[in-house]
Amino acid sequence: MSTIKTKCFIFLAVLSLTWTLSEGGAVVSCVLNESCILPCEIQAGSDPLIHWIHVSTRETFVHSFYNNQTQLKHQFHWFRGRTSLFTDQIPRRNASLLLTAVKIQDEGRYMCRTSTSEGNKKAFVDLKIEAPVSDIRIHQDGNRITCSSEGIYPQPELTWSTEPPSNTALQNRTTVHQTEEKLYNITSCLMDHDPNLTYYCTVKTQTNQKTGLVKPEMSNNVQKFFRKGIGFPLAAVILVVVTIAIILTIKGCTANNTETPNNPENHENSVKTVDCLDELDSAVIEEINQDTVNSTAGLLAAGLS
């Protein structure tokens, strides 16, 4: 007998749990400051009565409809001017709520309680608000890379990665701040980065993410080569020579003078080289000098920094 009672108790417990889960309701996600529809279906019958209640805030009245018209006498001031029903669709059993300019404070559980001549019904809707990651600001200042993003909800996560992947743990400091509007601002600083790697900063929520990056600067590699490889005095000399060579080549300073030999049976031409520097005018020489000075000064300044 006790075994039968135990089985009946378990059956009723499971049945109760199933009924509770069936009332779990729909989950609706809405974007901050946009419009959102909370679904609800009313049973068939005449004399419809609809109450939308925000259960998460001590059963605050959100919107009511009865006597064939909207009733806002008991509406909580927070929702004033932001709620409406599709009244022309109520005869087709649509009791959905339109909520405009949604705010973080709107988040929570709503109950749609309806009644007609055929009986009563209630349903639940869980409203989730999201302010997605819109943009990422990432910049490098000396040996530090800073990544930040603002106005996010719910609280985001920030991760760093590199290309190519690095075996060294990335040392960073991340801070999260929540504003008075319940939005989150996140900032992370990465120290002692490798100038030869590309650094990626990713900020994400449950539904979206954005990524910013900092690429290695060519000037860093050049400075590193000059600083550690050959030294700045010799680097300055090399830079002068290379600069002059490039300019002379571009301007076609090497001229070929072709002459016809006296012997008509000799089909080879003799070549006479003309000194390029003699062909350059004063303006070109001045340009070479100026570029050389600028390049050398930039290199030496980088080495002293």
Image (cartoon, grey):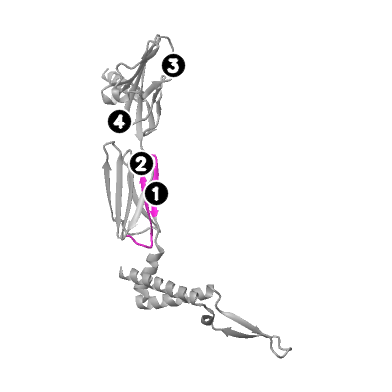
Q: Answer whether residue 215 is magenta in the image.
A: no
x and y percent of residue 165 in the render?
38, 57
x and y percent of residue 275 in the render?
54, 83
Quarter that holds the N terminus: top left
Q: Mark 2 to mark 1: distance in Å?
A: 12 Å
From the viewer's side, name the closer residue of 137 and 170.
Answer: 137
Disc with the residue nearer the chain's start (3 vs 1): 3
Read off the residue under disc 3. 90
Which portion, as a residue range, is magenta? 193-213
Secondary structure category for the residue under label 1: strand
- In the displayed structure, 114 sits above or below 292; it is above
Res. 205 mark: 2
Q: Is residue 55 left or right of residue 282?
A: left
Disc with the residue nearer the chain's start (4 vs 3): 3
Disc with the residue nearer the chain's start (2 vs 4): 4
Q: Mark 3 to mark 1: distance in Å?
A: 45 Å
From the viewer's side, name the closer residue of 302 and 108.
Answer: 302
Residue at the extreme front: 282
Read off the residue under disc 1. 211
Q: Is residue 261 left or right of residue 152?
A: right
Disc with the residue nearer the chain's start (4 vs 1): 4
Q: Mark 2 to mark 4: distance in Å?
A: 19 Å
Amino acid at pointer 1: Thr
- In the displayed structure, 301 sits above or below 73; it is below
* Mark 1: few/some/many CA within 10 Å (<14, 14-19, 20+): some
Res. 29 mark: none
